[in-house]
Amino acid sequence: MKYTYEELAKMIDHSLLHPTMTDRELEDGCKLAAKYQVASVCIKPYYVKRAAELLKGTGVLVGAVIGFPHGNSATESKRYESWLACQDGAAEIDMVINIGKALTGDWDYVANDIRAVCEEAHRHGAKVKVIFENDYLTKGGAGLDSDAFKRMLCVVSERAGADWVKTSSGYGFVRQPDGNYSYKGATEHDLALMRASVSAKVQVKAAGGVRDLDGLIKVRDLGGSRCGATATAAMMDEYRRREAAERAGQGTQGGGGDLGKGGY
């Protein structure tokens, strides 16, 4: 295998964010994350304290979402959410930028919004992932084309103290011409662009569109260090299957992971 089990498992932020998830499902999700020894769970803010209890001593971190999923909360609300999450045991914070302010070109507001969360989180030893929601940025904004706009967001995020830049929330649905809503999530193009637009001290996280082991491997190949996923068990069980086949001398070929066709 190209990467070890641990290298790939420790890329996964097991996503437990769907609005309909019950307490029982969240608890089961935390137990699954511990079983597969992923990097973290990315969980609803109200459940952070319980998740921290469930995962204590497992080596799996607890991450909380802030201003999720649309980023429209006031900056002080985001800062307070971050404080609460850290008090409850969050080691990582996934915050959504104020997308409308970014598209307006109010970069000072965007920077201050990110900085407030980063300063609060860092004060408690937590790290911050800054979510762009790239599906909303395909036409660019503030006089910039899409790629230039995303590069600007990377620069602003790094200067404001971000530890990661992140492609998507997993819930950035865009209305299509037929009236239906869909999204791509992480794409190979965006991951490469974002990796090239920040320094080595800032990491890149993919979210949405990575549903199988080959997709996870592609994220790593492109320089991503984390990946939001709900298909954790399927991904890592497939790793073990391929590993066993390789050891048996049978070999196996992947199905060609395809980023950008769906979400968490």
Image: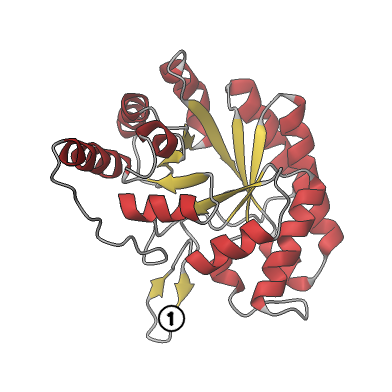
What is the quadrant of residue 2 in the picture?
top left
Could you tell me residue 232's position as x and y percent?
A: 33, 41
Seen in the picture, residue 109 relative to 119 is either above or below; the reply is: below
Q: Is residue 12 visible?
A: yes
What is the quadrant of residue 87 in the picture?
top right
Could you tell me residue 153's position as x and y percent?
A: 72, 61
Using the image as rendered, state which of residue 185 and residue 50 is in the foreground.
185
Seen in the picture, residue 229 relative to 138 is either above or below; the reply is: above
Using the image as rendered, state which of residue 65 and residue 152 is in the foreground.
152
What is the quadrant of residue 116 in the picture?
top right
Q: Looking at the figure, which quarter contains the N terminus?
A: top left
Residue at 48%, 49% (x, y): give it: 220
Seen in the picture, residue 1 relative to 62 is either above or below; the reply is: below
Secondary element under disc 1, as helix, strand or loop, is loop
Q: How is the image coloured?
A: secondary structure
Taking the image as shown, residue 239 lies to the left or right of residue 47, namely left
Which residue of the protein is positioned furthest toward the top in this rendering?
Answer: 57
Q: For the residue carrying disc 1, how many other residues have a C-alpha within 10 Å: few (<14), some (14-19), or many (20+)?
A: few
Which residue of the protein is positioned furthest toward the right in this rendering?
Answer: 108
Q: How many marks?
A: 1
Using the image as rendered, state which of residue 31 and residue 88 is in the foreground.
31
Residue at 40%, 63% (x, y): give it: 259
Identify the residue position indicated by label 1 in the image: 176
What amino acid type is highlighted by mark number 1? Gln
Could you tell me residue 107's position as x and y percent?
A: 82, 62
Could you tell me residue 21's position as x and y percent?
A: 35, 41
Q: Is residue 113 visible?
A: no
Taking the image as shown, residue 27 lies to the left or right of residue 220, namely left
